[in-house]
Image (tube, rainbow, N blue to C red):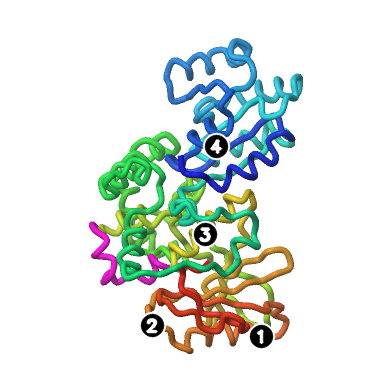
Amino acid sequence: MLPRTLASPIRRYRRQYPVVAIVGPRQSGKTTLARHLFPGHRYLSMENLDTRHMAEDDPRGFLDDNGGNLILDEIQRVPSIFSYLQERVDFEDSPSSYVLTGSQQFLLMERVTQSLAGRIATYQLYPFTLNELRRARLDRDMDAILQIKTVPGGDGEEEDLCRILFSGMYPRIHDKRLDPEKWIENYILTYVERDIRSLVNISNLKTFETFIKICASMSGQLVNQAAISNAAGISQPTVKKWLSLMEASGIVFFLRPHHRNFKKRLIKTPKLYFVDTGVLSSLLSIRNPGQLKTHPLFGNIFETFIISEFYKRIHHIGERPHLYFWRDRTGNEIDLIIESGSRIIPIEIKSSRTYSPAFKAGLSRWMRLEGNTARKGFVLYRGRETVGKTSDIAALPWRRM
């Protein structure tokens, strides 16, 4: 098993809570991490039909028979068990007695809110980050994430980037050295036909498949519910519901606009991003890494990759990401704004391989706005040279953050 950043915060706090929950998208490595961190716990999967029936038919008897120190995998499949878990942990109160995992985040979180508030430490696990995949030094905190790194480059750098974008970061692809195209194709099929069908009444799954492909074409763009509605042939309330469903199941996330008033009229619509560029590439019908180089949406895919890396890395240190974008009514825009305590760090993302001083223009303009407290900004691009490392705005190869 490749080391996961999230292991550290779980180890740090597992003695303080009777229940630990690891949630995230299907196949992100939740079960593997839980069994690695809690080797003395008995493992029970609610995907197993017999186990699930026993837990559903007699939750109290099920917990009595199996005792404490349990890993309950895919726990959201037996929602009735949460109230009985509350009863047991209130009586026993042993640290990390129950470890819960769940793929469908919103179901698990709803039940946790109702039954286990104050008794549970919840962590979100996503597919690999690049430093996890490369066995590089794992992030410890926000300072480590925002630190400029020393990373050697090579002649195969561009091909390597395209391969990463195409393959995505789901652990099984890399652990088993699987063909990413086929695995991701099956992953999407399973997600649509199994997870979505079990969660919402969709009469025609083909319509949902069309919907997620339309969303893929809009990754890195402002959410336009009217445009999605027209293209998919569904109502805007349905668009809103299905977007929330995709977010809750860990397929997409939204970047909210930064609302600090710098005396500008601001865009208030969020931007849509896919968590994994392998899934995104598959939905865009990209069939090999070479097709990425000339794809008309390459810039959006590259931006999605960079922003999703920050999103995953912050979740994996056990914190909630405070990530935003900024755009005013005249079209001035900052791709990513990271808030960390009192710090505001703006980042521009450029898919060009050649540096241009014009890359810094938007950041310079934004940092001069009255009331802006940001002191350091970055441009991340595909080139090799670092420009202005010690200046207010440093241009860095994307690998250095």
Is 252 on the left-hand or right-hand side of 284?
Answer: right
Q: Nearer the viewer, residue 84 or 394?
A: 394
Q: Which of marks 2 and 3 is in front?
A: 2
Instruction: Read off the magenta span.
Output: 287-302
Task: Decide: few, some or many residues near mark 4? Use Cα within 10 Å; few <14, some 14-19, many ≥20.
Answer: some
Measured as percent of width and height from the top left, residue 293 is found at 28, 70
User: SS at mark 2?
Assistant: loop
Measured as percent of width and height from the top left, residue 387 is found at 51, 83
Task: Find disc 4 in the rendering and name its residue.
Answer: 107
Task: Decide: few, some or many residues near mark 2? Use Cα within 10 Å; few <14, some 14-19, many ≥20.
Answer: few
- Mark 4 and mark 3 in contact (Cβ < 8 Å)? no
| Position of 111 relative to 380 (above/below) | above
Dot label at residue 369:
1
Task: Find disc 3 in the rendering and name its residue.
Answer: 254
User: SS at mark 4?
Assistant: helix
The amino acid type found where label 3 is placed reads: Phe
How far is mark 4 from mark 2, CA to CA? 46 Å
User: Residue at 44% across / 15% down in the picture?
Assistant: 50
Q: Verify whether residue 293 appears in magenta.
A: yes
User: SS at mark 1?
Assistant: loop
How far is mark 2 from mark 1, CA to CA? 28 Å
> Which is nearer the N-term, disc 3 or disc 4?
4
Task: Find disc 2 in the rendering and name its residue.
Answer: 354
